[in-house]
Image (spheres, rainbow, N blue to C red):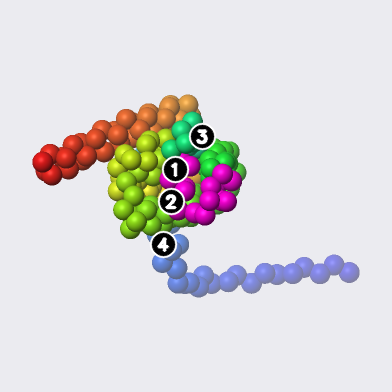
Amino acid sequence: MWFIAMATPMEPVAQPVPAACGAVCKLSVALMSRMVVVDGRVPISWITPPPTIRRAIRVSRVLTEMSGAVILLLAAVFGLAAASKLRARASFIAVLQNLVPRRFVTPLSFLIPALEFSLAAFLLSGIAPQKAIAAAIVLLLLFSMFLWKMRQRGLRGCACFGESSDEPSINSGMVRNVILIIAAASVLAQPGPISLVGPDLSSFLGRITIVIGVFCLWPCLVALVNTRNRLSTN
C-alpha cells in the first residue's frame, strides 16, 4: 500500500536577527560592493578591505617586526655579555669578590657566562619564545638587584661587558636593564605569535638592522651622559 504524504505549506515566521549576524551581513555587503567583475568572474584578490582592517593589519605587522627585533636584541645582549665576561675574566672576578664569598667566585665566573650563553641560544632557537622571554626578564631583574647592591656599596663598575671594575657603568647598566625589561614585557603582552625570522628575508634583515642600530646608539648615549657628568662636576 502506498501512502502519499502531503506537506502543508508553512507560513514564514519572522525571527529576530542577532546583532552579530546583522554586522556580518553588512560587512559582507560592503565587501561585495567593492568587487570588480571581469568576464563573469570575481577575483578575490581585488577585494579592498575597509580602512579599519587595513590599519589593524599594518599595526599587527609592525608589532610582529618589533617582537622579533626585541628577541634578537636580547639574545645579542646576553651573548655579548657572556663572551665579554670570559674575555675579561679578571675584571669580572674582581667584581664578584666584592659581592659573594670567596669560595663562590671561581664557579660563578664560569656559571654566569654559561647561563647567559644558554639563554641567548634559547631565545634564538624559537622554541617556546614566551618562556624564553620570561626567563630573560627574570635574569635581568636578578642582575639589576646585584647592580643596586653594588651601587649601595659605592662600587663603580660591574664588568658586565668586560669593562674595568673602576669604570663607572652601574647606573647605565641599571637603565639598560630597565629598558630591556620593558621591551621584553611588551612582547609578552602581545596576543599574536612571536616571529623571529619570518615572514620573509627582508623582515629578518630589518630586525638585524634595528639591533645593530641599538648597539651603535647605546654607547654613544652613555658616552654623552658621562661627558656631561664630568663637565658638570668640573
Identify the residue under disc 3. Answer: 86
Horizontal and vertical percent position of residue 86? 51, 34
Identify the residue under disc 1. Answer: 94
Quadrant of the image containing the C terminus: top left
Horizontal and vertical percent position of residue 186? 39, 52
State whether residue 26 is above or below residue 2.
Answer: above
Quadrant of the image containing the N terminus: bottom right
Instruction: Give the secondary structure at mark 3.
Output: helix
- Residue 187 as seen in the image, left or right of residue 2: left
- Cα distance, mark 2 to mark 3? 18 Å
Residue located 41% across and 66% down the image: 19
Q: Nearer the viewer, residue 102 or 87?
A: 102
Identify the residue under disc 4. Answer: 22
Give yes or no for residue 98 being in the magenta stretch: yes
| Majority secondary structure of magenta residues | helix
> What range of the chain is rendered magenta?
92-108
Residue located 44% across and 43% down the image: 94
